[in-house]
Amino acid sequence: MAYKPQYGPGTSKVAENRRKQMNPSQKLEKMRDVTDEDIVLILGHRAPGAAYPTAHPPLAEQQEPDCPIRKIVTPTDGAKAGDRVRYIQFADSMFFAPCHPYQRTYTECYRFRGIDPGTLSGRQIVECRERDLEKYSKELVETELLDPARTGIRGATVHGHSLRLAENGMMFDMLQRSVLGEDGIVRYVKNQIGEPLDRAVAIGKPLDEKWLKAHTTIFHSLGGTPYRDDAEYIEYVQRIHSLRTKYGFMPKE
Amino acid sequence: MTEAIYPQVRIVSARFLRPDTAEQLLNRLVQVGGIRRMSINGPSIPETVPYGPARGKPNPHPDRKVIRVGDQDVQLQVQVGTIILELEDESYIPAICEAVDEVFADKDFSCTVQQGRYMKTQPTMSDYAKYGPDADKEILGLVDPRKKGGPVIIQGTK
């Protein structure tokens, strides 16, 4: 019987949202339009229109060792061209952000190739070849994985995910990279590491509370879906916990 | 250090305050009177980028502003989230609750006033190790006594 991934346990809406994001056969809902140039500006790794700096010559120009793995794995576009490895990092507010660090890592591992995600409690970084990064970042920014107010693209000084929101509903950002305008549109005025941009990059209106609560992947006992209400999820986590605790004693189920 | 005989209250809003809301709230509190000391807490908004590749570059932030409280200018260095007050006596607490309710009446989030002990009453061993025996006891336990620029003194009516 062919292996069919289940993506995750749980009967609640939150669990369902998590599975939906992880499942690569489910198309993520597109929420906004951001141009390639906008993405390059927010990332701040190279000037828009500049050539991709390289870390090594293109694979076609260099002698590859005779390696069976290299024959099986097709290199990504960035690897083929020898691009540098660059990153994008997100901070997600615990107030019903559509995604969160662990979820991002799972989602990216299922959906993208040639990536190296790093997961922390309040932020998640993903590294890959620059060309691929821009392609993946565009998908991460344009789809339902991002809310302009409660998700921040923050390369450094990410503090804010567990803090109260600001009066206007934006997540706290020490460097105020994104600003909510009078017209209700969020604009990035600095790149992800906090250098001012030549022009503001609009990434759309913040999503409303109702949408966020319906699409969040975060359990939250205050106003959201409490974790303890999802018995299946708890059972699964308890089983893993118990097995890893007993592992040294060679458990037999 | 504070004397344990003075009551303390903490004002906590459900959201971080904009500088103009903070200004409005603080001015309303100053009108109530009876405040010995006040400390404004919240996450810091630094003048320059503290770390990362852009470290040391200026950090223009719309919420790092000078606000006018009473007859003094106050430079905000944090995004206001909590205000701790030390009062002369408990009789001022109802008036403070009323003032807070008044300011937050037209906002779509709440703000609570809690009574308890929020300022240090004795220097700790770590305070002694960090700041030495001659640290300014007036502000120890509220802010870093080594910080340049002392407290802002708002003249009362007494």
Image (tube, rainbow, N blue to C red):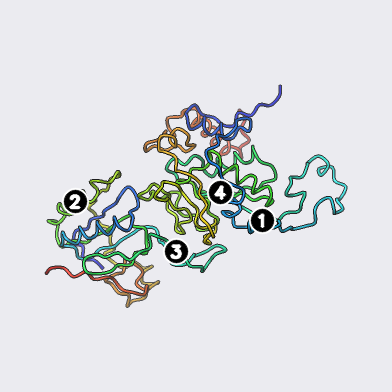
Give the secondary structure at mark 3. loop
Q: Which amino acid does label 3 sit on?
A: Pro
Q: Mark 3 points at which residue?
A: B60
Name which residue lies at 15% across and 53% down.
B95
Mark 1, residue position = A49
- Report x, y in % for residue B151: 28, 71
Label 1 Cα neighbours within 10 Å, binned few <14 / some 14-19 / many ≥20: few
Is residue A122 in view from this perspective? no
Q: How far apart are marks 1 and 2 (CA)?
A: 57 Å
Distance between mark 1 and mark 4 Cα atoms: 27 Å
Quadrant of the image containing the C terminus of chain B: bottom left
Q: Are marks 1 and 2 in contact (CB under 8 Å)?
A: no
Kindly give the residue lying farthest to the top in the view shown: A1
Chain-order first, disc 1 or disc 4: 1
* Res A142 seen here: yes
Q: Label 1 is found on which chain of the structure?
A: A
CA distance for labels 3 and 1 = 27 Å
Q: Is mark 1 on a helix, strand or loop?
A: loop
| Image height of B33 relative to A122, above or below | below
Q: Residue at x 33, y 67 (%)?
A: B75
Q: Which residue is drawn at 35% across and 52% down?
A: B16
